[in-house]
Amino acid sequence: MTKDAPSTHPPLPPTTEAERLSCLRLLRSRRVGATTFHRLMQEHGSAAASLEALPRIAAAAGVTDYAICPEGVVMAEYRAGKAAGAHLLCWGDAAYPEALRDLPDAPPLLWAMGDSALLTRPMVALVGARNASSLGTRMARKLAGDLSDLGYVVVSGLARGVDTAAHLASLQGGTVAVQAGGVDVMYPAENTRLAEDILANGGVRLSEMAMGLQPQARHFPARNRIISGLVRAVVVVEAAARSGSLITARCALDQGREVLAVPGHPFDARAGGCNMLIRDGATLVRSAEDIVEALPQIDAAPQQAELDLQPAAPASMPKAPRPRRVPPSDMPKPKRSLKQIAALHQMILDRLGPSPVAEDQLIRDLGAPVQSVTPVLIDLELDGKLRRQPGGLLSRG
């Protein structure tokens, strides 16, 4: 029996439900990732032919007990996707994101929820720290809101911190969330409402993972390459020297995307990664204007009015009015447990860094009553963990 000759024709996108199921079955088979999927499709021309050849290829590699993904598993995932309101975007489909198509490890299949037409618009990614400072989240909100007003779609990863701020600020213009687990799995759980609001406002949620899959650490780098692959520029708002956001930046460089970063105070560990990127050649970002200027001309957003942005002064902080200080003796003191007080202490310290932030802005970011926060600020000041600066500003002690 002669060995089958490799196909000389490029693989065609699946056009029927049976072909889509074959693609899904091939991708979910053991040891078949994105790169192997594309190679098999190139050699055999279709998912069905690749599935037929897979056990023989595995045997030639010394794997004698290889079995392709059971059909029942694939059907269960397919039905779960339909039940959740998701649809499959297959590599080669007209609806598949154009920016991902030429990547060597392009996701063969993406589960999508929402209006996929949003993926045809120019996109910019905003990524950064999960434990973002108050200044970091404010910067993310400002950049995301202004980019959205200019007609750009903001892409991020639905994580805590910078991702959450970026999605929230760009909800009205449409935002894309790329998830590390299944597209129907809300992670972190606290962002369930945000995930729902993204779809309600015309946004999109994407994942290459199986429906119902809980994200694990190894899934996030794979997710990050999709974030950077979708866009023409990745902006790192706040990131430590070993942050996962730097993985996204490295993916962007490998994919030929622009990398930009917001500078931070040298003493703030959360800004170490951003400062390293700028040192190594990333474009410094002060405003959305800086991002737009760095983008290739093909990404100019159509039919959008120019937004008049005032660049931030490089060496001075905006002066916030000093909030009225209530004497401790006159302040109502709500009863709080030691656990609640310790949690509030930590929340405040997490949002403070060497760069000062306005006290009233910090209180707004915390979302807690003034009468609950002010006594704790005094406690932290007395403990030397907080320092007051002129103009009603606070920083870490």
Image (cartoon, helix red, strand yellow):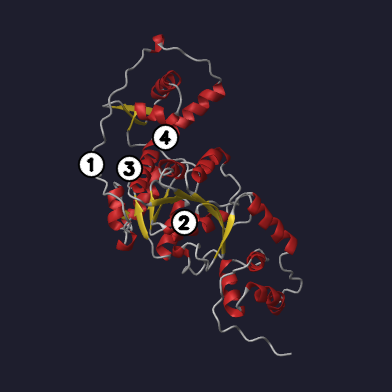
SS assignment at label 1: loop
- Work out whether mark 2 precedes mark 3 in sequence or the reverse, and give the earlier one: 2
Which is more toward the observer, 84 or 293? 84
Residue marked by disc 1: 313
The first of marks 4 and 3 along the sequence is 3
Q: Amino acid at mark 4?
A: Arg
Give the structural element (helix, strand or loop) at label 3. Answer: loop
Is label 4 in a helix, a strand or a loop?
Answer: loop
Single out the mark in the foreground, 4 or 3. 4
Q: Residue at x 43, y 54 (%)?
A: 246
Across and down, in percent, residue 47 comes to: 64, 72
Query: Which label lies toward us, 1 or 4?
Result: 1
Label 4 or label 2, whichever comes before in sequence order: 2
Residue 392 visible in rendering: yes
Name the mark nearer the viewer: 4 or 2. Answer: 2
User: Label 3: which residue?
Assistant: 265
Look at label 1 and name its amino acid: Ala
Give the Cα distance between marks 2 and 1: 38 Å
> In front: mark 3 or mark 1?
1
Q: Is residue 285 above or below residue 382?
A: below
Question: Which quadrant holds residue 133?
Answer: top left
Mark 4 surroundings within 10 Å by alpha-carbon count, few (fewer than 14), some (14 through 19), many (20 or more) = many
Q: Which is more foreground, mark 2 or mark 3?
A: 2
For residue 375, side relative to residue 391 (left or right): right
- C-alpha span from label 1 to label 4: 22 Å
Q: Is residue 16 above or below residue 227?
A: below
Q: Is residue 4 above or below residue 164?
A: below
Give the CA distance from mark 2 to mark 3: 40 Å
Residue tagged 2: 117
